[in-house]
Amino acid sequence: MQNYNSADERMTEYEAHPIADLFPMMSDEEIANQAEDIKKHGLLHPILLFEGKILDGRNRYKSCKRAGVEPRFETFTGTFTEALQRVWSENVQRRHLTSFQCAAIVVAQDELVARIEAEARERQLSELKQYREDDTVTQTFEERIDDTVSQKIDSRSDEIVEWDDQPEPQPEPVLTPTKPKPSRNEQTSDAILAQAAGTNRQYVNEAKKIKKKAPEVLAMVQKGEISRDDAKKITNLDDEVRKKTIREIEMGINPKKAIQKARTDTYKQKEQKIIDDLARPIINQESYKTWLNNQPLCDLLITDPPYMTDVDDVETFAKEWLPLALSRIKPTGRAYICIGAYPDELAAYITASKQSDMILAQILVWTYRNTLGPRPSHDYKQNWQAILYFRGEDAGKLDCPLMIEQFSVQDINAPDGRIGNRYHKWQKPDELAERLIRHSTKKGDIILDPFAGTGTFLLAAARMERVAFGCDNDPEILKIAEERGCQIE
């Protein structure tokens, strides 16, 4: 059944309904052409009113005024939500909009969203009230317990009868409602908006978040200038970087290139912030052989020593430095030693670890999918490295509330030189460094790295307000560490 009442209206001024403003008006040239057609053939389709405003037919109304033709009107008598659905279904077919664009266009209208949310709340309350009125259930188990306890109170003496003197309550009967409880998901404003706009709840929810944090980004989505993924990435940028990125896109730079540039700039800014705002981690230009003995006992030793391909004899090398380094850890401390995945290297370090009182608790795995190199012909492709995880006998619990971070396999891509944050071949990702440091230490704890390299672990520690010390004897590597924010002594 159509929701219309025929109504002849005088040539009065009507403003557009907010629902109608979801879509842009015709150009002046198009209006002029339509006015000429109406002047010749009359108005073929009446203008639809809702709440005293033009719901559908703004262009025809304007053309009628220009042509001097008296417009005809009909009044839409449905709900606000039904009005939205009608206008949307008639207009969206003529435009090539993505599903996320549809969500953005609807969410951008404050008055529209407020009305939909109000109707959704009213509908929920009405249906819930009806459900409670119609649904008859027997007394619940908890209610009978309350009644039993109440019966124990002697109103004449204010004494409570012993519980053992009362019979056991009977099991709760199966409740049989007369009809199912209304589904919340079907009534939410997000669901109604999604249905009206031909999209889904997730997109509506995401569009709302973007609107709250960066409405200018949502406007770009509405105009089809950026995709959903690009919109989310731009929204998550810092305010100033986001504004700059938007300006670059408006100037014609490809959105993906602008976002990549913004991420590079952000990374450099974070590293500079270490220099400007935080205590700089200290790296001594010295060998671990002399440096370790002069260090205080630490809460965490985390390091990435040379691999077996970079030393003459990995077994001798491991025995030389590992027990010494582990001796500089508190009984409450931990260690993460990053090594290669070669069988001989693993065997050498497992053997060397037996010379220490520290417990080799696990061999963790760091796996990556973005730095692979050539494909071997006879063996399987290595895309992982080992992390020897040691803990002291008095070590406390890991600070790891997220189970996904506590997996023994850490799946994190290697640093990507294309966005400016990779300084040497086997540099560990910042996410891995920060994750391990966060799990095993707290603010103010001492962290040591006897093979500091370009300072990845120590810089991560400084960002997290730990006290970080390290050493390395490669001048070229230390130059990079200094540029990144480390203090070289």
Image (spheres, rainbow, N blue to C red):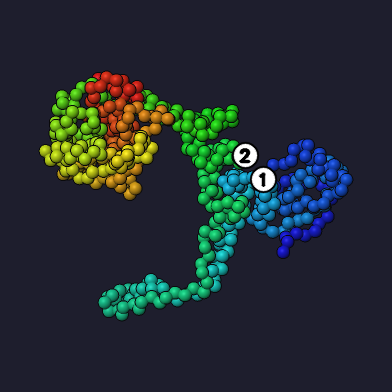
Residue 69's label in the rendered image is: none
174 above or below 105? below
Residue that appears at 56% across and 55% down: 191
Residue farthest along the left direction in this orientation = 355
Report if residue 464 is visible in the image. no
Q: Which quarter of the figure has residue 104?
A: top right
Residue type at mark 2 is: Lys
**Does residue 397 appear left or right of residue 355 in this picture?**
right
Q: Residue at (47%, 35%) from the top-left corner?
A: 237
Residue 398: quarter of image? top left
Residue 240 located left or right of residue 33: left
* Label 2 sits on residue: 223
| In-front residue for pair 449/187 | 449
Q: Position of residue 313 (x, y in %)?
A: 16, 30
Q: Position of residue 184 (x, y in %)?
A: 51, 60
N-terminal of the pair, mark 1 or mark 2, is: 1
Quadrant into which the N terminus falls: bottom right
Position above or below: 122 against 422? below
Distance in Å between CA atoms under marks 1 and 2: 12 Å
Q: Quadrant of residue 188?
A: bottom right
Amino acid at dot 1: Arg
Taking the spot 54% from the left edge, 72% from the top edge, the residue there is 134
Residue situated in front as seen by the camera: 166 or 363: 363
Quarter in which the C terminus is drawn = top left
Residue at the image point whose x is 22% and y is 32% from the top: 308
Front one among 341 and 100: 341
| Closer to us: 139 or 5 | 5
- Is label 1 in a helix, a strand or a loop? loop
> Residue 323: where, in percent of width, then height?
14, 35
- As drawn, the label of residue 95 is 1
| Residue 307 horizontal/vertical position (percent) | 24, 32
